[in-house]
Amino acid sequence: MSVKIGLVGCGTVGGGCIDIIHKHAGDFLRHLGIDIELVRVCSLSRSEAEMHGAGDLFTDDFHDIIEDPEIDIVIELIGGTTIARTVVLEALRAGKSVVTANKALMATHGQEVMDLAEEVGRELAFGASVGGGIPIIGPLKHSLIANEIESVMGIVNGTTNFMLTSMAQEGMTYEESLANAQALGFAEADPSADVDGFDAAAKIAILASIAFNTRITLDDVYTKGITSITITDLEAARDMGYVVKLLAIAHRTETGIDVRVHPTMIPTTHQLATVNGVFNAIYVVGDFVGETMFFGEGAGAGAAASAVMGDVLEVARHIQQGIAPIVGCTCTDDLPIRTIETLSMKYYIRFSVADRPGVLASMAQIFADHNVSIHSMIQRGAKEDGSVDVIYVTHVALESAVREAIDQIALLPDVLHGEPSLIRVEE
């Protein structure tokens, strides 16, 4: 029995899926006994389908796929949460299984589409929504299911990792590294989803929901990007034995789920510290398996298409063998989400301050008044405007106390030159 597929969205990833089917469909049948056939491709222009040898399958109306009774699986690759949501919901209602790489959809409307899939008895697979070609969702839902997952932490955005690597290793400014990433095709013309951390936030919302069996949406994730990171911060981190990465972090704690995205200083000895360039890595700790790490290319047509087609083949196998849909949503718990203000950890704080007597004493008193203990303090050379960079690293402190101290220091008359920089430190 041939499992028929309709593809909605023929961009870089969709084109990669077509290429994989053309190249390996015979191998899938010979090696795996899975017979798949691409029968319709929906795109904005015929030329996109023609580029991949699928011009004869072209349609510009996704309803042609939804309403085709012969199509078993719909692949949604258009992205976003508006039309894509409509495609996914209508496909499920039409009795079709769905494979998607849409992280934004799953991080905002995941419960809605999973509930509908369960209601209509169809499968929803979204392995490519996090990590591109890195197989992380499958292991969390299958291989590691015997564990209580304690934490998920990773570099899940290749653009920002490439930029931070360029800044640290080549001395580029933020602006220079962004321009370089855009010139090489690693960053979009509007890079805000990457550099402001929202792409990573959607991904950690999905991973945390699966890992902790509780519903976490994009709005639950504290998010801060890399736009305020400077070469000074990266050099100071290096001198102290750390590197700076944009990390997506989710921890299970006694008081709830701690889930966040922000620039983070980690020791150079940490497994994630050597993950550079456009590569991603996801570090998972389970109560029985211990520490595991998944590493690979997190983006690109080939890596993402590989993950999409992995899901397609798994769903097609279930259809051919008459296997009931695999459980999609395991969010049976309702664990509280910890706010960022309740976090306790070490902090790196850089101030650009007026270079005059009494400033450091005033700042030290404010930290003491807020019960923030200083582990070390470094002062860097004077600038033309009469300011110096003063860098503090705290002992473990309460986030709300650290923020209150920074806010009070900002009120000191004629002291600060520019916004302070705060980077959290994970040991």
Image (tube, helix red, strand yellow):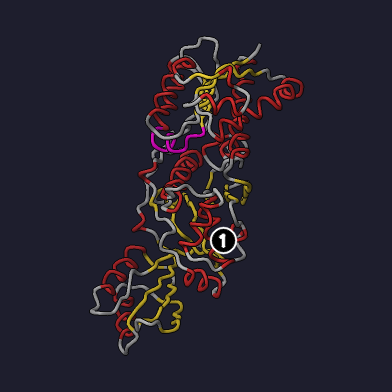
* Residue found farthest to the bottom: 357
Q: Label 1: state its secondary structure.
A: helix
At 52% from the left edge and 63% from the top edge, which residue is drawn?
Answer: 244
Can the viewer see residue 259 in this picture? no
Pinpoint residue 366: horizontal percent, then vertical percent.
29, 77
Pinpoint residue 111: horizontal percent, then vertical percent.
41, 31
Which kind of residue does numbered mark 1 sit on? Thr
Figure quadrant of the N terminus: top right
Is residue 372 left or right of 47 when viewed as pictured?
Answer: left
At 63% from the left edge and 30% from the top edge, which residue is drawn?
Answer: 310
Judging depth in this view, the residue of 170 and 89 nearest the camera is 170
Q: Give the range drawn in magenta.
A: 101-109
Q: Is residue 174 magenta?
A: no
Label 1: few (<14), some or many (≥20) within 10 Å?
A: many
At 32% from the left edge and 66% from the top edge, which residue is drawn?
Answer: 403
Reading the image, the residue beneath label 1 is 165
Judging depth in this view, the residue of 360 and 211 nearest the camera is 360
* Residue found farthest to the front: 47
Q: Does the magenta stretch include residue 107?
A: yes
Q: In this view, does 157 lie above or below 167?
A: above
